[in-house]
Amino acid sequence: MEAINFKPDALVTEALRYQSKIGAALGTLSSVDEVHFGVTDKEAIYSEDKLVLYRFRGERKPTSKVPLLIVYALVNRPYMVDLQEDRSLVRNLLALGEDVYLIDWGYPDRADRCVNLDDYINGYIHRCVEAVCERHGLDRINVLGICQGGAFSLCYAAIHPDKVQNLITMVTPVDFHTPDNMLSHWTRGMDVDAFVDSLGNVPADLMNYCYLTLKPFRLNHQKYVGLVDILDDKLELENFLRMEKWIFDSPDQAGEAFRQFIKDFYQGNKLVKGGLLIGEDAVDLKNVTMPVLNIYAEQDHLVPPSASIPLKNLVGTKDYEVLAFRGGHIGIYVSSRAQREVPGAIHRWLGERN
Amino acid sequence: MATHKSGDDWLKMSQDYWRGWQDLTQQAMKGIQSEQSAAPWHEGLEQWSRLFRGGPGQSDMNSVLDQLLDHGRGYLNFLQQVASHPGSFGAEDLRAAAQRMMEELRIASPFAQGMPFAGSPLGEQFATALKWWQESVAPLQEQSQGWSRMPAFGMAREYVEQAQALSAAQEKLKDANQRYGALIAKALEGGLERFQSKLAERFEPGARRVEDMRGLYDLFIDGLEEAYAEIALSSEFRVVYGDLVNAQSDLRLKIQRVVEQVTGSLGMPTRSEMNTLESRVHELRRAAKRSHEHPAVSSLKAELDELRQELAALKASQHGAGHDDDELPLAPGRAAAGRKPAVATRPVTSVRVKAKAESAKTEAAKLSTPKATPKAKPARASSAKPAARAATRTAKGK
């Protein structure tokens, strides 16, 4: 039996097909419109340094009495949750009646080199929570932490349990020492002090380099070979370019915050092992006593499921629910399945508890 | 089902390809050479590139074009390599084609120079610094082999030691780079093995066959990724990767130190000075925020609001009693000047106001001496904390 089920002549056909797609693409590329993102109306309600706290405006008034604050990661831009009209977690949550706020961290520069995790968690996040509470006359609100923002939200909820009514964590790393966590594996031999001391802030290009080398052949080659299949489709091409924009539009990382995050989370695994200090506050996840919904992605190569799942046994709440999403770290925001499944699940879960 | 091909067949295939390519492009351009059977297949991409490349003002478009074509070249080379084996689609032939493709991937991948961050702006900066070092200091090193291990003495001993350390750091980086490169090469070789074994699986009866050329390419990428992941998650890779990153950091720090000495001697501000200032400014801002959110300040603010309200109420009541605004209560200077103090008409309120003013002074004094309130919770004491949180606080400063 032959392993290959096509004739050598098919090679010529494939080469010509590929060439013709490239040719069509060159026409499409020159006619592609400027890529826009962050489609939902929003107003800035609080700002501090480079941070801006936004409130999104839906087409109808929110029906939820308790607003939801999204805490995104520092390592990418938060417009991933509102990428385009038909791929927007925010838009879908608004349509379901949620009142959605989002922290935009901005782009740290060298002047922000000293901003540390205490500043982010007990400073910026806390003041944003206070601003939302004050606006609504509430003592506590719902918090949705995403990826690294989920780890920050866990710390915040453990230190300030009186400020969080319900906590949702999405693709959030908790156990950083699972055997399939490549990023964690690489960082554990690093002298992070020398690294940060020599760089100041950690450049976004360097961060992106690390992410691309997690799957170097798929992300640097196969992805672009596959791109030819959509090159003659203007809409699909725009979607692709929007995603490319998001992937590479990354902020530099404030040096001190990066130093502590690598030391305490990636190297020390202190969310699991204990001993984590944010400023002068010890983080004990047993203090996370509010209801928790933990959403992870089954094919996540950045935050493997094994890194998220252990949260269940670490938090102090008795009201814990987990949602496994069939997709990857990015698909959980932008795939069609995500639009169908994730916002509805969040809304239902919150509705049962607000 | 695959069929066997002779060298003549291969020539014919290439001619077919170029004939097809000519058909594709004839509407866009004229005069493509007809005798191109020996040319690489990706030459077609170069012609697209020449055809669509924009002028000097269209650098973005050209950049996109280059990226697109770069990846296309690798894929087309793979196709051509597979097609160029006239015997059959046997596993060995495909392995040979994959070997060539791997070289393409290696060039296109971030591992091109065997060093993380190569190709990025950071890599370029680092390369510039290294070049400077190699041009200015390394020649000295070559002149006196072994000098880097000799003890230094005299006036210049610190500088000699510094140069020796720089030289050692460069050697260390070179060594780390080689070890990293060796592991990447091992991963690539492993990728070929995986590809071959994946192909072998497809020869098994009942196995799913590769249906098209893209499927074959995907199988190759799967093999590479699997082999790379195995290496990248190994304990050896962790050590080598860490050593490489640390060697880069170390060399960067040492080069920065030399640059600082040079710029400092010219009276220019240095990075160390900037770092010190940044840290001090940051601490000042943190202290200011802590003070602003200190419970005593919240308490003072609340009292101030209350005082304002009472003052407004007093004003309003005095208006009602026919007093002029100039004769407000609590204006000691005026009272001392012989005017009848308004407090006389509101004795009870006046006492309360004074008491609050004293309280405010005391709180202000506490604030100015933070050590006097070691248990005060800085930055977030506007609401009472539950017992759970209090229990988590460490003894440090609590």
Image: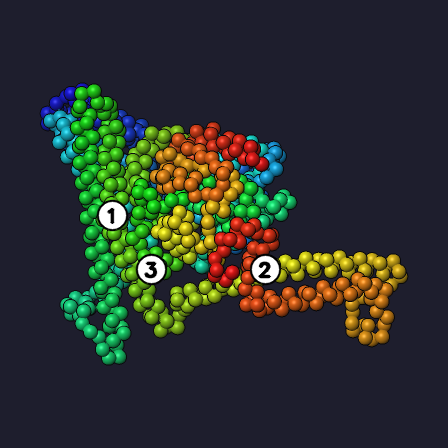
Please tell me which residue is depicted at 33% across the width and 53% down the height of the picture: B122
Of residues B60 and B165, the one nearer the viewer is B165
Please say if B265 is above or below B179. below
In this view, the mark in front (3 or 1):
1
Using the numbered discs, state the Cα–Cα distance from disc 3 to disc 1 in whole angstroms: 22 Å
The quarter of the picture where residue A94 lies is top right
The quarter of the picture where residue A113 lies is bottom left
Please tell me which residue is depicted at 39% across the width and 31% down the height of the picture: A326
Residue under numbered circle 2: B294
Inspect the image, locate mark 2, and give the three-letter code of the amino acid beneath it.
His
Q: Residues within 10 Å of mark 3 (few under 14, many from 20)?
A: many
Residue under numbered circle 1: B235
Q: Which disc is residue A194 wearing?
A: 3
SS state under label 1: helix
SS state under label 2: loop
| Residue A146 seen anywhere in this rendered image of the structure | yes
- Chain letter of disc 2 in the image: B
Of residues B213 and A82, the one nearer the viewer is A82
The quarter of the picture where residue A14 lies is top left
Please tell me which residue is depicted at 82% across the width and 72% down the height of the picture: B335
Please tell me which residue is depicted at 58% across the width and 33% down the height of the picture: A97
